[in-house]
Each structure stands twice: as C-alpha cells, then as structure tokens.
Image (cartoon, grey):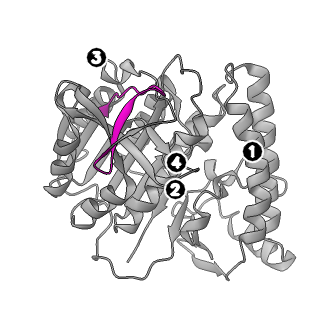
C-alpha cells in the first residue's frame, strides 16, 4: 500500500502484489551488488555504471508498482505538489519485501529519484500487539546515545553467536577511524548536538561511548535502561543470507576490546528493544574500512535485516544502511542528517533523511544517497 500525505490531505493507493516485482528487482540488484563488490568500486567509470544501473532499476520499480496508468497519473499529480512542505510517501509492505529498494523509484520525465526530492519511508505490516509509542519530538529534552564499535573478524576466527562459539565464514575489516577521538563519526555528531543545544535548538544530553569503553552486555544494559530517545550505532553489520537468515551487529566481549567478538543477533536486539518505551530513533550506521579484507562482501554487511527487528519491537524510526559506505561518507551522511533534524527543523525524521540524501546525491560514490533505508512505524 502506498500513502501520500501533505498539507492538502492524503492519497492512498490500494494493495499491490509485490512478488513479481520483487523477483525482477532481485535480478537487477545482483548487477548492483556485483559492481559495488569490485575492489576498485569507487572508480569513476564503475560509479557511472552503478548510477545507470540504479536509475534503470528505479524506473523498473516505478513502472511495476504503478502498472495501472490511471493510478500512475494520480501518483504523479500527487507528487508534483512541490510547495507542500509536509509532503511524504510511505510504502506499507510485509517484512519479506523490506529489501525492495523503493528509494530508487525514478518517475517518468524526472531527473532525480523520488527519495532525494520527497521524504520516503517504509512501514511494515504487523499484528498490532506492540506497546504504543509516540514519534520523536525534537522540542522535548532528548537523551542521545552515540556508540562506536570497531570489531575485526577473519575467516579463521571464532566468535560468540547466540551463546555458542562458532567459526565464521566471513570477514570484517578493521575500521580504526570510527574511534578517532577528534574526527570520528560520533565525535562529529556530538559537536552538532552540542552546538544545537548552545544555540537554543533543543535540550540535549549526549552519552558518547567509543569501542574501548563498551562491551556486549554493557550495550544491552544501556538499551534496557530505557534512558535514551535516540541511539546511534557506528560499526559493522552483517546479514547471514545462507544459513540462519539472521543479522548481526558486533561488540567485544569485554571492555578495552577484550575477549572474543560477540555477535548481537537481530532476535536478541529486538527482544531487548521491545521492553523500551522511550526510544524513538535507532540509527545503524554501517561503514567500511579503507582496506577491506579478501572475501569481504559489502552487500552482506549492511543493516536491512536488523531494521526489521528494530521496527518490529515498536521503535518508531529505524534507520540503517543497505550497504556500508566509506568512513568519510558515512560521517558526512550522518552529520547532514542530524544537522537537518536539529538545525533546519525540517519537522520529521524522513524529511531530515531526504535532505541528507539530496546533499550527498552528487557525490562520486553513488552508494551514499541510496544506501539509507528508513522504516517508520505508527501504532
């Protein structure tokens, strides 16, 4: 179901069978994944090919989802209300279609994908048996947790997964930049938040924790405390598409990067989040080290799988990356998002993300604008 809302009211488009669309899209997504997994994927020629492939896929999704010409015409007229500052589009779907990149949609006669001109988000069909939770109110006093977690895994390593020590078949490269005490992502975000508070943009309290200050259990305890309105995680994510179908984020077993690496799986994270009532936004920022190790597959190291767990736990806003992006671009995207949210007062998470997409659309790395996926739940 597609819902377009704005100051002038809303338009809802009926239910669609996404099975055929999704099957076609998966084939084209394979081409994109092949390009982004090239060792020199940021080569200008590869990036041009990537943008072309993304545009082609965006046109496919647009034509397939809006097959009925009358509905397509109504959709186009509804999205041309450029003066409507509250215009947004939501796509409601079953979680099995969560990876459908509706963010790529490229309408007829448009130079830009919808996601860089109109706030877009997904919602998931649920059974409704979730705590009622209100959306983020930037005017309230906000507690914000910023966490970086630099974990390293080689294919010969054993890590802890669901309480068992297991040999992994994937690698995660060292991303020491996430812990730079001067210029890391969470350091730069903290500067924006402190500046926002100093300039009267909101009452904000920040708890910033680097890799050597956090461990697996401490992170779960921080969530369970139900103290925070926003949690921002900067580190690795992994989607296991071949075995359990689970997804993970990673922490060290002990403080100061001690012990083994522990994988926090989506199920455990979801159960912990389900008990919270104050959390409004969980931002999963996936970044790639400068020198990815052999066997590292970018398209398996994003957060789309984790987003399902976060959203299903009733968190109003779950924002994560489809693919990891470079350290510098991950930081720029996050900073532009928080800057728009607290300084531009754009009014919503989805509008802040649209602004960040628009700011990064012209980057040489074409995965930046299209990597974010936002799931927004209202109960």
1 and 2 marks in contact (CB < 8 Å)? no
Which residues are the magenta region? Answer: 148-164
- CA separation, marks 1 and 2? 18 Å
Residue located beneath label 2 in the image = 245
**In the picture provided, is 25 more to the left or to the right than 346?**
right
Q: Is residue 44 above or below residue 345?
A: above
For residue 36: magenta? no
The residue shown at (40%, 28%) is: 157
Q: Nearer the viewer, mark 1 or mark 2?
A: 2
Residue located beneath label 3 in the image = 182
Q: Is residue 92 above or below residue 325?
A: below
Q: Quadrant of the C terminus?
A: bottom left
- Residue 131 appears at what percent x and percent y? 27, 76
1 and 3 marks in contact (CB < 8 Å)? no
- CA separation, marks 4 and 1? 16 Å
- Residue 374 appears at what percent x and percent y? 49, 55
């Amino acid at each position: 179901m597609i819902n377009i809302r704005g100051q002038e009211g809303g338009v809802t488009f009926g239910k669609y069978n996404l099975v055929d669309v999704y099957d076609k899209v998966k084939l084209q997504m394979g081409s994109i994944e092949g390009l982004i997994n090239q060792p020199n994927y940021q080569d200008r020629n590869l990036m041009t090919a990537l943008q072309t492939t993304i545009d082609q896929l965006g046109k496919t999704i647009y034509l397939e989802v809006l097959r009925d010409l009358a509905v397509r015409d109504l959709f186009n007229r509804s999205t041309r209300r450029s003066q409507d500052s509250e215009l947004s589009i939501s796509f409601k779907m079953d979680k099995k279609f969560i990876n459908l990149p509706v963010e790529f949609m490229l309408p007829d006669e448009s130079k830009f994908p919808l996601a860089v001109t109109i706030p877009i988000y997904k919602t998931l069909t649920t059974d409704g048996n979730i705590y009622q939770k209100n959306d983020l109110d930037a005017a309230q006093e906000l507690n914000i947790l910023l966490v970086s977690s630099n974990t390293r895994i080689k294919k010969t390593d054993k890590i802890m997964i669901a309480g068992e020590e297991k040999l992994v078949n994937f690698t995660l490269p060292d991303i020491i930049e996430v812990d730079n005490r001067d210029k890391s992502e969470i350091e730069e975000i903290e500067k924006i938040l402190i500046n926002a508070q100093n300039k009267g943009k909101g009452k904000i309290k920040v708890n910033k924790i680097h890799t050597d200050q956090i461990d697996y259990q401490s992170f779960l305890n921080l969530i369970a405390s139900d103290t925070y309105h926003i949690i921002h995680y900067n580190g690795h994510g992994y989607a296991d598409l071949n075995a359990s179908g689970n997804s993970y984020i990673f922490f060290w077993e002990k403080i100061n990067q001690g012990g083994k690496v522990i994988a926090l799986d989506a199920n455990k994270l979801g159960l912990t989040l389900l008990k919270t009532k104050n959390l409004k936004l969980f931002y999963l920022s996936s970044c790639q080290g400068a020198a990815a190790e052999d066997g590292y597959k970018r398209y398996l190291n994003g957060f789309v799988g984790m987003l399902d767990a976060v959203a299903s736990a009733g968190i109003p806003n779950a924002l994560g990356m489809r693919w990891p992006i470079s350290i510098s671009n991950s930081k720029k995207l996050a900073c532009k998002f928080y800057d728009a949210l607290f300084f531009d007062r754009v009014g919503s998470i989805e509008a802040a993300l649209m602004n960040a997409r628009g700011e990064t659309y012209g980057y040489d790395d074409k995965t930046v604008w299209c990597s974010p996926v936002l799931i927004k739940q209202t109960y």
